[in-house]
Image (cartoon, helix red, strand yellow):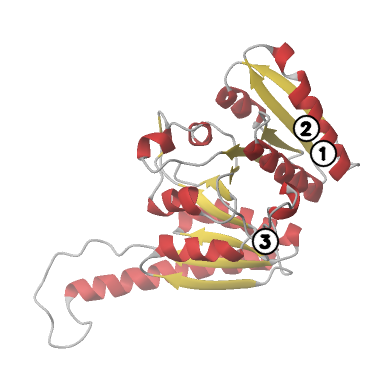
Amino acid sequence: MTLHHVVVGVDGTPAAVRALDLAADDAARRSAELRVVYAVPDRDEAGPILSSAASRIRERHPGLRVVTTAAQGGAVQALAAESEGAALTVVGTRGFGGVTGTLFGSVSLRLAAQVHGPLMIVRGDHVCHGETAGTDAGERLGTGHEVLLGLQDDTDVTAAAFAFEEAERRGVWLRVLHSWEHPHVTPEMPSLVPATSPGQRRMAQHDRAEEAVARFSLARLQEQHPTVGVDARTVRSGAAQALLEATREAAVVVIGSHGRAGRLGPHLGTVAHTLLHHAHCPVVLVPSADR
């Protein structure tokens, strides 16, 4: 199925303007329609914000088809409904607090539990890669030179496919960090011969299996996207910190959204939490096969 539109939520805040700029850039790369949604208690209040958003987009992308919608009610429900059939949904956030309650109370995380397809979260509380004082928001964001993919296991195939397509559209390299945690191994007496105890053998077999899955998934996608250059490496520990550091040079980081969603959002792991709090570029959550 061809996806013909990109959705973005606006509310007049600086974070929403950043999200609007990135959503417009993405729609232009896809030659897709951009749907701008403003959720308000009274639709009559939406006019100035939507008009300003449309004018900004026309200045930056004169040929882009734009549809503005004033949705009465909550932002999460409105954006989730508009995301049906969308290639990407984009939201801005003023930033996640330092406590879990603030993170899971945010619109973006609640939307992640209901959105149909990939969700880009654009943080507005930090200086992005390439940003300088007085530079327009659209010129600051997405200025990295690569797409970054955090690959955990074979359930991330949808996120990997999205990352390859994104790198191809942007004409940039794809950098892949493949990470996993070792399975639990019951404590045992050390072996006199290195790597020959039952637990060590199981860990080695697990490592080989994980690496094989990653290589197979990437090789298959690279055949489908032969113009995309790929730089892949494996991280066996400290995956969250390694990905976070790599976001300094990335235009966007793509990760899978794992597990069943709870009432206030998806059950996100350490890597996702770290990126949503501290990433130096926008984060795209792509629902994985196990969700």
Q: Which residue is mark 2?
A: 53
Which mark is nearer the camera, 3 or 2? 3
Q: Which residue is mark 1?
A: 57
Which mark is nearer the camera, 3 or 1? 3
**Residue type, label 3:** Gly
The residue at the point 71 percent across, 42 percent down is: 23
Q: Are marks 2 and 1 in contact (CB under 8 Å)?
A: yes
Q: Which residue is mark 3?
A: 130
Quarter that holds the C terminus: top left
First-in-chain label (3 vs 2): 2
Number of marks drawn:
3
Q: Are marks 3 and 1 in contact (CB under 8 Å)?
A: no
Is residue 84 depicted above or below 247 in this figure? above
- Expressed as whole percent of the image width and height from the top left, the position of residue 254 reads 56, 54
User: Which residue occupies the foreground of this view, 283 or 93?
Assistant: 93
Quarter that holds the N terminus: top right
Label 1: which secondary element: helix
Q: Is residue 179 visible?
A: no
- The image quarter containing residue 37 is top right
The residue at the point 55 percent across, 39 percent down is: 94
Q: CA distance from mark 3 to mark 2?
A: 24 Å
Q: Residue furthest right?
A: 63
**Residue type, label 1:** Ile
Q: Residue furthest left?
A: 189
Say left or right for 52 vs 284: right
First-in-chain label (3 vs 1): 1
Is residue 280 depicted above or below 201 in this figure? above
- Expressed as whole percent of the image width and height from the top left, the position of residue 38 reads 68, 24
The residue at the point 39 percent across, 43 percent down is: 98
**Residue type, label 2:** Ala
